[in-house]
Image: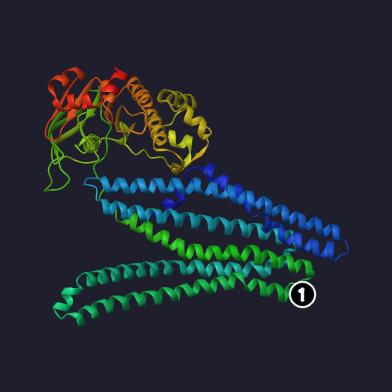
Amino acid sequence: MTFQLLWRSVAREPGRAWRLAAWSVAEVAPSFVVGLALAGAIDDGFGGGRPEVGVIWVGVLGLSWVVAAVGARQALLALAGIVEPFRERLIAGVVQDALVGARVEAAAVTRSNLQVEVARDAFATVLGVLRSFVFTLVSVVLGMAALMPEVLVLVLPPIAAGVALFLLSLPALARRQREFLIADERTTEVVTMAMGGLRDVVACGDEERTVALVGRRIDEQAAAARALARVTAVRTFSLGLGGWLPVMLVLGFAPGLGASPGVVVGVLAAVVQSLTPALGGLVEGLGVSGVRLVVTLERLLGNRPVEGPQRVMPPDVRVELSGVTFRYGPHADPVVAGLDLVVAEGEHLAVVGPSGIGKSTLAALITGLVRPDEGAVTVGGMAADRVDPAARVLIPQEAYVFRGTLWDNLTYLSVASASRVDGAVDAVGARELVGRLGGYQAEIHAGLLTPGERQLLALVRAYLSPTRLTILDESTCHLDLAAEARAEQAFARRGGTLIVIAHRLTSALRARRILVMDGSTAVSGTHADLLRTSPLYADLAGQWGPDLEKVS
């Protein structure tokens, strides 16, 4: 399962994989040129009394390094284009697993997120070293074949033997690495427990038993470390066999095969400068990052909860809450208490109330991210937690933008044509931002965008999605009043059901109906009705008086 996941991540978008391969060819250009250039410079150039030829060969070698520098930069970007989506899918699966059928355990999600980051870094390293070794090996072999094919018999067999020995040791290395990690965790656990209860241990005179317990765990970890070191020694031997034995064979036997001094120097340069570092990177990368990647993915994928109920597409998106009560703990006060609410399909509802009163919790209940303690939440007559995510979209206050092209970010939830994307960008009011970022194919990074810019991109993404139920959970709070109005009006014109968790009361004036939450009760009505019937709403309207006049 682990290797299938990794392979799908590479093959998911063939265009990016081919782009990585193409730039990798450019990156290893010196590996192909170095032997030919040095042999030509020594034998035909400086050694043959024609220094101008030697200078030309040296210039060719220098030019290949320029090509390699450009290729390395572009290959790194192409590699990120494969690795970052892998991270996004992995973290989405982890978070979804944490949300299936239960409350969110923050510590578990945080721990899993850290493991995802470890997996992402390890995957990038593994993919990078595999790519580098394969392309370098092919480039060196082609270069030697063009220079003097006979020397390949001195180079390829020890490299093949070293790689084979290393690959044979990988299963044992992974097993020992896993045992060491488990032993390390057990040692940490028992030492933490002993240190936390040190005063009680001394008071009860239980020092000897505690020392013995901690000592056993330390001994187990030391034994696991020694076993890991023994397997690691095989890795070192395979590197010496594949990386340095060819040097000795070339020095000892290449002249006997008819190799000139320039050919010997060129072959040695190709081996020492290109092949040996690539093999070292492969051994180190797979031996450390590869094992870490497998172990981490096994933990992430092997501890997944039992799959929840099958998701279904509802016939409509009528939202209904019947006697819904929800609390964040068995002894906590309810955040939502006995709430009855019906939102008809196509309705535009605004939800207002003080901060922390339960508005975002209401959004989580409607989208099925949490289940009520009492009552029922349905969408189209289906339990909210069983509704297919494609039927609704929730944009939170902190909008998420992933690393990649602007186009990929905008069309993440849809398959849209350029004209549709243009229409959504114009409707939501993001045209100026798209121009500033450099167009749809520009690479973007969340850290370089303001919170308001991230919100605009997330709103365009939601606008393009085919969902009929849209929930904006204070997702315009970083926009100014005019930008907020334009975005909300665009969603109102778009059709479908729109629920806006209002950051400003101006959002309420644009809705057909307003729900006011005050922690104990919830009342709904129009703006005029609530001014008469809800003291809380009247107070909120009074606080927002100047801004309400701007949109009235």
Answer left or right for 220 relative to 36. left
Question: Where is residue 539 drawn, in percent x and y?
Answer: 18, 26
Task: Give the left or right position of residue 368, taking residue 456 as reference.
Answer: left
Q: Secondary structure at mark 1?
A: helix
Q: Quadrant of residue 390?
A: top left
x then y, percent, for residue 268: 70, 68
Q: Amino acid at mark 1?
A: Gly
| Mark 1 Cα shell of 10 Å, populated few (<14), some (14-19), many (≥20) | few
Give the image location of residue 377, x and y in percent: 18, 34
Left or right placement of residue 318 versus residue 259 in this view: left
> Could you tell me which quadrant the N terminus lies in?
bottom left
Q: Which residue is mark 1?
A: 256
Which quadrant holds the C terminus?
Answer: top left
Residue occupying the point 24% across, 35% down: 363
Looking at this view, is 491 or 388 the one in front? 491
Q: Nearer the viewer, residue 190 or 35?
A: 190
Which quadrant would residue 58 be assigned to in this image? Answer: bottom right
Residue 346 visible in the displayed image: no
Q: Judge whether 218 appears above or below 3 on screen.
A: below
Q: Quadrant of residue 500?
A: top left
- Residue placed furthest toward the bottom: 208
Q: Is residue 395 above or below residue 274?
A: above
Residue at (46, 37) in percent of width and height: 408
**What is the x, y in percent for residue 97?**
29, 48
Q: Nearer the viewer, residue 243 or 455?
A: 455
